[in-house]
């Protein structure tokens, strides 16, 4: 038997192996969930092509195609995919539980609500309109941070630096406010002490004198 024929026989045997068949079914089911997430579940988003989703996640189109065909992603790649889709790892990888599990008593986290219902995003945007589009900026920042690129590292570094600088300014403002408060209290104490001194009778006023300068 040729080596080619031997490989063919072995491959056929593996295909008939119950364990391999079950694993293959699990891989196919996982790939189907990847496709479902990209094309159906991300409400509020247009149906994405493999090319668009792969670029947004940070991988090649062929890599995403393989994952959707059943190839199991590495832990690092898995984190990138989960960060982009914002879904449950248990559901995406193993088909367990809902795609967007609840994290609060109102039916889910803010991110899962936005993914399920675009009207939730509009409500939050309207509520934060007075902050100058803060929600949109936050969403952009989250997208960049989840990209795991040099841009995410730079943004994270800047956010931490700005936060530290802001905290220092806030501490200085509190110190300045305290100094002003103490200055005002000191001024009031001095004014109060000066007023009290001006109302005290002088010794001369308390002891009337006669014409010869002696006390009467």
Image (cartoon, rainbow, N blue to C red):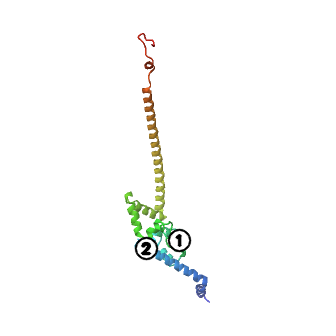
So how many labels did they put on this image?
A: 2
Q: Earlier in the sequence, mark 1 or mark 2?
A: 2
| In the foreground, 174 or 19 | 174
- Residue 202 lies left or right of residue 5; in this view the side is left
Q: Is residue 151 visible?
A: yes
Q: Residue at x 57, y 80 (%)?
A: 23
User: Relative to 15, is 65 above or below?
Assistant: above
Per the image, label 2 sits on a secondary structure element best described as helix
User: Relative to 12, is 139 above or below?
Assistant: above
User: Relative to 172, is 89 above or below?
Assistant: below
Q: Where residue 58 sits: x, y (%)?
A: 47, 68
Rounded to the nearest whole Å, what is the CA distance between mark 1 and mark 2?
22 Å
The answer to which quarter of the image holds residue 22 is bottom right
The crowd level at tag 2 (other Cα within 10 Å; few <14, some 14-19, many 20+) is some
Assess whether mark 2 and mark 1 are in contact (beta carbons under 8 angstroms). Answer: no
Q: Where residue 210 sits: x, y (%)?
A: 42, 12
Per the image, label 1 sits on a secondary structure element best described as helix
Residue 51 image label: 2
Q: Where residue 19 sits: x, y (%)?
A: 61, 82
Residue receiving disc 1: 89
Quadrant in which the C terminus is drawn: top left
Quadrant in which the N terminus is drawn: bottom right
Residue furthest front as drawn? 216
The crowd level at tag 1 (other Cα within 10 Å; few <14, some 14-19, many 20+) is some
Q: Residue at x 59, y 82 (%)?
A: 20
User: Relative to 214, is 195 above or below?
Assistant: below
Residue 125 image label: none
Residue furthest top as drawn? 212
Q: Nearer the viewer, mark 1 or mark 2?
A: 1
| In the foreground, 162 or 186 | 186
| In the foreground, 28 or 136 | 136
The answer to which quarter of the image holds residue 199 is top left
């Amino acid at each position: 038997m040729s080596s080619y024929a031997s490989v063919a026989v072995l491959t056929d045997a593996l295909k008939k192996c119950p364990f391999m068949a079950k694993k293959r079914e699990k891989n196919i089911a996982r790939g189907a969930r990847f496709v479902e997430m990209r094309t159906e579940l991300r409400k509020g988003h247009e149906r994405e092509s493999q090319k668009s989703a792969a670029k947004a996640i940070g991988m090649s189109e062929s890599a995403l195609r393989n994952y959707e065909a059943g190839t199991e992603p590495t832990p690092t790649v898995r984190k990138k995919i989960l960060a982009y889709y914002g879904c449950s790892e248990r559901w995406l990888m193993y088909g367990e539980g809902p795609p967007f599990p609840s994290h609060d008593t109102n039916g889910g986290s803010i991110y899962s609500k936005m993914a399920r219902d675009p009207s939730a995003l509009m409500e939050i945007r309207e509520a934060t309109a007075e902050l100058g589009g803060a929600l949109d900026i936050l969403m952009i920042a989250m997208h960049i941070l989840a990209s795991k690129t040099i841009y995410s590292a730079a943004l994270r570094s800047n956010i931490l630096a700005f936060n530290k600088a802001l905290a220092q300014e806030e501490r200085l403002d509190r110190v300045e406010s305290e100094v002003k408060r103490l200055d005002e209290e000191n001024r009031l104490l001095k004014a109060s002490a000066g007023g009290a001194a001006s109302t005290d009778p002088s010794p001369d006023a308390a002891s009337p004198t006669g014409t010869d300068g002696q006390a009467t």
